[in-house]
Image (tube, rainbow, N blue to C red):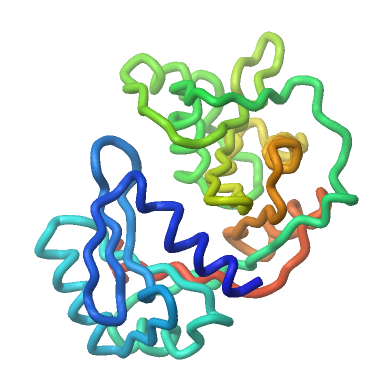
Amino acid sequence: MWDVLEQFYDSVPRPGSRVEEHGELTLFLQAGDGYPYYARPRFPGGRPTTADVVAMREHQRSLGVPEALEWVHETTPGLLEAAREAGMDVLEAPLMVLDPDQLPEPHPHVRVLDTRPVEVSVVAMLAFSSPGTAVGEAGAAERDAALATATPMSTRHRHAVADLPGEGVLAVGTAQRAGDVVEVVGIGTLPAARRRGLGGAVTAALARDALDRGATLVFLSAGSEEIARVYERIGFRRIGTACIASAEDA
């Protein structure tokens, strides 16, 4: 499974990025619209050192892109210490795979789309600006205000929205695919709409859609142990740790 995941991580950003090889690290640079990318260990078998990470940070800084590095701890265990020695903050996120037999029944107001409605970016932005699972303040009013100036983005992926009658889009998510492997990413619920099961319902819808379209492996990375428990309730189980490193002042 680790080899399959490493190939996925190397493959999925390539169609939407410019790729630079820097010794033991590969840098994916944003091409066109979309989100900024990151550096990863060279595939296959990259073993970056602290010096490699320091050099990559300097290069990213010179380009004006985020100083960001991602990897799987079980595949590249030495990189955790190297990244911290290079002055980076590291999020150790539970890496989880789907047990298809545990998926819940579909939610009646969750839709999976092959287009990217502008609500996907807006709801995700509001959700991630207030991380965690606790109910917060940002809700439909803040969403609608942000939608007034939001710009649509192109997509290569599948998206899901929880669009409730009279309330609009309250939760969103994305599934990105390479070969027969699908990663569910960007799950976010408006803070004011949390604790209603919508994030889990969106995740489950994307997972079910991936299986229906022939995926053999569906996985995700949870932002915390608390969030991982949400995914456990819909059939995901932890297999390892995804590391996401950023500059300490990011």
Judged from this view, the residue extending furthest toward the top is 166
- Residue drawn at (29%, 89%), measured in percent from left and top? 50
x, y percent for residue 211:
74, 42
Residue 107 figure quarter: top right
Q: Is residue 199 visible?
A: no
x, y percent for residue 224:
61, 63
Residue 196 figure quarter: top right
Q: Quadrant of the N terminus?
A: bottom right
- Residue drawn at (31%, 18%), measured in percent from left and top? 149
x, y percent for residue 188:
57, 40
User: In the depicted view, which residue is nearer to us: 180 or 204?
Assistant: 180
x, y percent for residue 68:
32, 65
User: In the depicted view, which residue is nearer to us: 158 or 189?
Assistant: 158
Q: Is residue 141 left or right of residue 33?
A: right
Q: Quadrant of the C terminus?
A: bottom left
Residue 66 figure quarter: bottom left
| 24, above or below 152, in the image | below
- Residue drawn at (50%, 45%), measured in percent from left and top? 130
Q: How many marks?
A: 0
